[in-house]
């Protein structure tokens, strides 16, 4: 999953980016509203963490412009604890959730997991595909009840597919959602990771749809 983090305070931005990356997300970061607006309009993100008090263009204006342009990615706004009016304005502008500063990283991660699930129409934190399960709270994959050992990128790729059961996902889409903007992307590596995953999963769980991409489907 790929996130956009928009925060102008350098120390907090570094801390949040490190925490999000440790949780397995690919993260692009912006420190002002103009850069944030551009990234949100040109790059595909699974969710956005947006501070409202930004330089150049304030966060509320950025959010309104995204929504006016039809961009529907889930947005979690960060507000000052006592600024109830910011929370109301943010939600009215199209935010999906808010978090007041200061906050615990665990709460931010939990809210992001819920937003990403809801964006795909998934209510339960436990995702299931045949004998394969993903507990989004712990990030733990199990196969027939046994913990599945995966590398970081294998985990990220399989988690993305688990959030889209039955959907055909192209190599381009996977590349765009598994790597941050400054990463040296190569869609051919997706084939390598899919091949590695297939060796660890039941036959037929990851299907190749010729000329289109991959689909996760419970094996018969």
Image (cartoon, grey):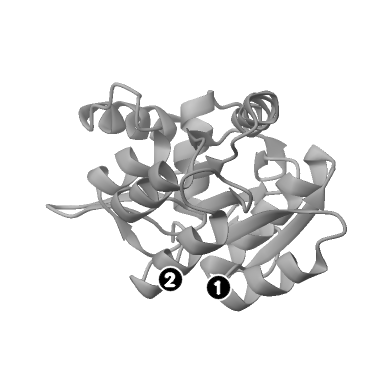
Q: Secondary structure at mark 1?
A: loop
Residue 148 badge: none
Please name the residue shown 76% across and 55% down the image. Answer: 99
Please name the residue shown 24% across and 44% down the image. Answer: 172
Residue 15 visible? The answer is: yes
On the image, the x and y values in percent for residue 81 come to: 86, 54
In the image, is residue 26 above or below residue 14? below
On the image, the x and y values in percent for residue 9 come to: 65, 32
In the rendered structure, which disc, 1 or 2, sits on the residue that comes first in sequence? 2
Please name the residue shown 68% across and 40% down the image. Answer: 139
- Please state which of residues 59 and 22 is positioned toward the viewer in this rendering: 59
In the image, is residue 113 above or below residue 153? below
Q: Residues within 10 Å of mark 1 (few under 14, many from 20)?
A: some
On the image, the x and y values in percent for residue 92 come to: 62, 78
Residue at far front of view:
56
Q: Secondary structure at mark 2?
A: helix
Q: Residues within 10 Å of mark 2 (few under 14, many from 20)?
A: some
Say if mark 1 contacts mark 2, CB within 8 Å.
yes
Residue 201 visible? The answer is: no
Please name the residue shown 18% across and 55% down the image. Answer: 212
Residue at far bottom of view:
92
Q: Is residue 157 left or right of residue 214?
A: right
Q: Is residue 74 left or right of residue 103?
A: left
Q: CA distance from mark 1 to mark 2?
A: 7 Å
User: Badge 2 is on which residue?
Assistant: 67
- Please state which of residues 41 and 174 is positioned toward the viewer in this rendering: 41
On the image, the x and y values in percent for residue 62 come to: 47, 58
User: Badge 1 is on which residue?
Assistant: 94
């Amino acid at each position: 999953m790929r996130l956009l983090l928009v925060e102008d305070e350098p120390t907090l931005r570094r801390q949040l980016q490190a925490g999000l990356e440790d949780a397995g997300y690919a993260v692009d970061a912006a420190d002002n509203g103009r850069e944030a607006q551009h990234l949100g309009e040109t790059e595909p993100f699974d969710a956005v963490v947006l501070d409202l008090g930004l330089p150049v263009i304030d966060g509320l204006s950025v959010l309104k412009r995204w929504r006016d342009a039809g961009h529907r990615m889930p947005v979690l706004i960060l507000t000052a604890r006592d600024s109830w009016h910011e929370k109301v304005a943010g939600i009215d502008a199209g935010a999906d959730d808010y978090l007041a500063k200061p906050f615990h990283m665990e709460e931010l991660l939990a809210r992001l997991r819920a937003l990403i699930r809801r964006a795909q129409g998934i209510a339960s934190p436990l995702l299931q595909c045949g004998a394969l399960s993903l507990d989004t709270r712990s990030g733990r994959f199990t196969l027939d009840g046994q913990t599945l050992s995966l590398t970081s990128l294998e985990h990220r790729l399989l988690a993305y597919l688990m959030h889209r059961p039955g959907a055909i996902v192209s190599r381009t889409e996977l590349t765009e959602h598994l790597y941050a903007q400054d990463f040296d992307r190569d869609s051919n590596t997706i084939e390598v990771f899919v091949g590695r995953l297939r060796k660890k999963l039941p036959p037929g769980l990851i299907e190749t749809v010729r000329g289109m991409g991959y689909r996760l489907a419970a094996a018969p």
